[in-house]
C-alpha cells in the first residue's frame, strides 16, 4: 500500500469504550492509513447480527471486534462473581459469539478479534486461578482456545494475542479508575500495542509486508571464520554455550522464513 492509497475504512465494535483505541489508530502515522469508526457502545451482538445496521454502510475494509469475556459469556461473569458454573455453558456462549463473528464475513474484507484477557478490576484468588473448571484463568484459556478453533477454518477472520499487549505495558496495562470513570479497561500502552499489531496484520494481509534479513555468515550464523579454521573447527551446536546460541539463532531465522499469511485485504471499491 502506498502513501497515496485511500485509508482503509475500519469499524471497531466493542462492549467497552473503544474511542481511545480508535483515536490512536486514526493518528498513527505508519501505513496503512486506517479510518476507524466506533460502533455504538455496548451493542456488540446487535451490530454483529444486524446486516442492515448503519455501521455496514459503506462496506468496511476491516472490522475489529474487541470484547471482554465476562460481557460475552454470562456464565463466565457468574464464575468471576464466585459462583460455581458449568463450563459447558461458558463454551456455549463462546460458540454463540463465534457464530456471530462468522456471520460478518460477507460484509467486510477482514475481521480482527483480540483474544480475551482477565479483567484487571477483579480481585484474583491467585492460588485457585488455574484450578480445573473453577479457576477463572483456566476457563479463560479454554474460552480462547475454543474461539480459535471455531474461527480457524474461516478465511478473513483472525485472532490477535491481546495478552502480549498487556505484558508489554506491564503495570500501566490497566487502571481501575479508567474503568469506573469512563469504561476504559486498558491503559494507553495497551491500545498503542494493539494499533501496532493491527497495522502489521493489515500490511501482511494486504501483501505489503516485507521480510528481508541481511546477515554475514562467519561469526554470525556460526562462531569462527570458515576460511581460516575450516568447518570442523566452527563453533556451532554441541555442549558449548556459544554453539547452542548459534543453533537457536538459525532456528529462529528458519521459523521467520515460514511465517506469514496468504490472504489479502484490499480497500473496497
Image (tube, grey):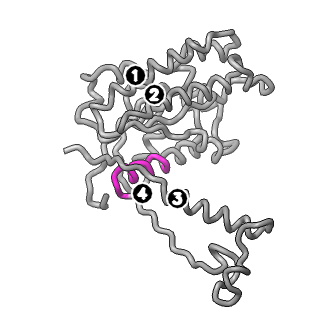
Residue at 48 percent across and 56 percent down: it is: 258
Task: Say which residue appears at 46% left-offset and 68% top-offset.
Answer: 212
* Label 1, label 4: how far apart the Cα atoms are: 33 Å
Q: Are marks 4 and 3 in contact (CB under 8 Å)?
A: no
Residue behind mark 4: 30
Residue at mark 3: 256
Residue bearing the label numbered 1: 99
Residue 92, compared with residue 162, is above or below; it is above
Residue lying at 44% horizontally and 18% vertically, measured from the top left = 96
Do the numbered discs 2 and 3 sit on residues whose CB atoms are within 8 Å? no
| Quarter of the rendering containing residue 186 | top right
184 lies above or below 72: below
Q: Assess whether residue 232 is covered by the magenta stretch.
A: no
Q: Nearer the viewer, mark 4 or mark 3?
A: 3
Question: Marks 4 and 2, how far apart in space?
Answer: 32 Å
- Badges 4 and 2: C-beta atoms under 8 Å apart? no
Q: x, y (%) of residue 25?
A: 43, 46
Q: Residue at the bottom extreme?
A: 228
Residue 35 falls in image quadrant: top left
Q: Nearer the viewer, residue 178 or 267?
A: 267
- Which mark sits nearer the N-terminus, 1 or 4? 4
The reply to whether the C-beta atoms of the residues labelled 2 and 1 are less than 8 Å apart is: yes
Kindly identify which residue carries mark 2.
150
> Split into 4 quadrants, where in the image is the C terminus?
top left
Q: In the picture provided, is 104 more to the left or to the right than 220?
A: left
Which badge, 4 or 2, comes first in the chain's sequence?
Answer: 4
Residue 14 appears in view: yes
Range drawn in magenta: 196-208
Amino acid at each position: 500500500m502506498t502513501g497515496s492509497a485511500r485509508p482503509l475504512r475500519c469499524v471497531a465494535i466493542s462492549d467497552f469504550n473503544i474511542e481511545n483505541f480508535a483515536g490512536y489508530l486514526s493518528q498513527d502515522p505508519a501505513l496503512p492509513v486506517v479510518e476507524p469508526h466506533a460502533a455504538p457502545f455496548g451493542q456488540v451482538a446487535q451490530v454483529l447480527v444486524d446486516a442492515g445496521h448503519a455501521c455496514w454502510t459503506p462496506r468496511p475494509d476491516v472490522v475489529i471486534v474487541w470484547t471482554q469475556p465476562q460481557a460475552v459469556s454470562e456464565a463466565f461473569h457468574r464464575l468471576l462473581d464466585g459462583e460455581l458454573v458449568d463450563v459447558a455453558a461458558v463454551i456455549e456462549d463462546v460458540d454463540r459469539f463465534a457464530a456471530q463473528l462468522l456471520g460478518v464475513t460477507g460484509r467486510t474484507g477482514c475481521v480482527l478479534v483480540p483474544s480475551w484477557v482477565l479483567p484487571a478490576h477483579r480481585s484474583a484468588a491467585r492460588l485457585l486461578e488455574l484450578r480445573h473448571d473453577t479457576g477463572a484463568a483456566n476457563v479463560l484459556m479454554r474460552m480462547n482456545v475454543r474461539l480459535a478453533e471455531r474461527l480457524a477454518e474461516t478465511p478473513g477472520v483472525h485472532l490477535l494475542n491481546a495478552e502480549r499487549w498487556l505484558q508489554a505495558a506491564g503495570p500501566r496495562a490497566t487502571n481501575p479508575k479508567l474503568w469506573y470513570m469512563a469504561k476504559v479497561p486498558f491503559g494507553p500502552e495497551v491500545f498503542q500495542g494493539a494499533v501496532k499489531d493491527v497495522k502489521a496484520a493489515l500490511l501482511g494481509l494486504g501483501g505489503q509486508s516485507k521480510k528481508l534479513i541481511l546477515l554475514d555468515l562467519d561469526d554470525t550464523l556460526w562462531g569462527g571464520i570458515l576460511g581460516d579454521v575450516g568447518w570442523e573447527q566452527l563453533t556451532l551446536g554441541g555442549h558449548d554455550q556459544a554453539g547452542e546460541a548459534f543453533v537457536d539463532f538459525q532456528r529462529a531465522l528458519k521459523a521467520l522464513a515460514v511465517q506469514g499469511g496468504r490472504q489479502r485485504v484490499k480497500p473496497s471499491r
